[in-house]
Amino acid sequence: MRNRYHQWMHNWETRLTTRDTNRVVRPLEWGVEWARHWPLVNGNYPKDQADYEGFIHDLNESALRDSDAFFAYRTPADFRLERHRVQIKAKDGIKQAKSETADFLRFTSPVITPYPENNTANARWFPGRGRRAVVVLPQWNSDVQGHNSLCRIFNHVGVAALRLSMPYHDVRMPAELERADYAVSANISRTIDAARQAVIEIRCCLDWLQQQGYTQLGVVGTSLGSCYAFLASAHDERLRVNAFNHASTYFADVVWTGQSTRHIREGIEAEIDLGRLRRSWLAISPMSYFEKFARFPKKSLIVYATYDLTFLPEFSRQVVEGFERYGLDHRVAVLPCGHYTTGEAPFKYLDAFHLARFVAGAF
C-alpha cells in the first residue's frame, strides 16, 4: 500500500507540474548589469564575457561576508493604504478589475528595476486585533488570490496579515510575461536582484506595521516565499515568529532538481553545472545564513512534504538538521503529499491547520 500511495502521489504531483504549457526555456545569462546598483559592488565590471562567472562568484562571496549591508535599505517615505478593486493580470497583458474590493499597502520599492510595474510594492492588508501581525509570501507564480484565505484564517486567530505580492508577480508582472519568470530564471543576476528586492520589501512591510502599532511581528512564506522569508528573518531581529512552508537549502539545488524548474535547467545545463550554479546563487541561499539567523531569538515552524518533487524532501530534512545543529527553537510538520498537491484538498486544510496553530501560539 505504501508503494502504491507513493506512486499515486508522484503521478498526481507530476500532472500538476506539467499542466502549464507556457514555461519558456531560456539560455544562461549572467546579467552582470543587474549588479550595478548592489551594495559592495566596486564598479569594476568585467569587459570580457569569459570573466562574468568569476565576477558573479566574487560578488556572492562579498555579499556573504557583509550580508547586512547587502540587504540594507532605506524605509520608503510614501507608504499609502489604498482601497480599490482586486486586479488580475489577463493573458493579453491587460490588468482587469474584479468586483471584490480590498485595502492594499503600496509603496515605492527601494530596489528599482527597469520594469515600472515591478517598482511599486503591493501588499493586501488583512487587519487584526491586538499587536500581532505577519507578512505572508505565497509561492512562485501565485496569482493575486493566493494565500488570501490563509490570511483570513490568521485573522480568526487574532493575527493581522499583510500579503505581499512578490517581485514580478500578479499586478507587478511586466506585460510581456505570462508567468513570474523574472523572479527565478536563467538570468543569474536578475534572480539575485529579485530575491534581494523581496527581502528588502518584507522589511519595509515591517516598518509600516510598526508605524500602525504592531509590535509582535512574524513572517509566513511558502516555497519561493519561504526562501525569501528565511533570508529576511536572518537579517531582521523583528521577525520573531517564522513559518517556512516548504523549506530547502541551496537555491541552485532546487532549480537543478525540481520538477517545476525543469525548463530553467534545460536552458542552462549545457553551459554550467550544479556546483558552479550553487556558487552563483550562494547569496540568496538559506543554507548560507544559519549563523545570521541564529543571532536573534526566534520561533520557527518548518513544513515539508514527503512526496515533494519540487523541494526534494532530503533538502528539507537538511534544513531541519540545520535548526537542530544550531539549537534553534523550532517545530516540524511533515505532510503526506507533494509540493503542488499541498494546495489541493484535503492537504491544503492540513497545511493551513499547522500554520495557523503555530502562528496563533508562537507569539
Image: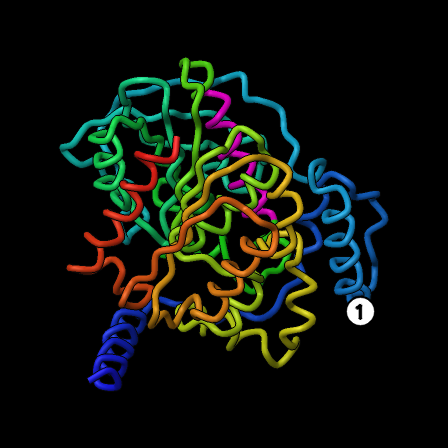
Q: Is residue 52 left or right of residue 339?
A: right
Q: Quadrant of residue 342?
A: bottom left
Across and down, in percent, residue 244 comes to: 42, 49
Name the residue rendered at 69%, 37% in the picture.
68
Residue 310, relative to residue 244: is it above or below?
A: below
**Residue occupying the point 25% across, 41% down:** 150
Q: Is residue 260 magenta?
A: no
Q: Which residues are magenta?
A: 193-208
Which residue does the numbered mark 1 point to in the structure image? 50
User: x, y percentage for residue 5?
Assistant: 22, 80
Residue 67, image x, y percentages: 70, 42
Answer yes or no: is residue 140 visible: no
Depth check: give the residue in front, 159 or 298.
298
- Where 132 sits versus 333, above or below? above
Q: Verify whether residue 202 appears in magenta.
A: yes
The residue lying toward the viewer, choosing from 91 and 203, is: 203
Q: Is residue 209 left or right of residue 57?
A: left
Q: Nearer the viewer, residue 2 or 67?
A: 2
The residue at 39%/67% (across/down) is 23
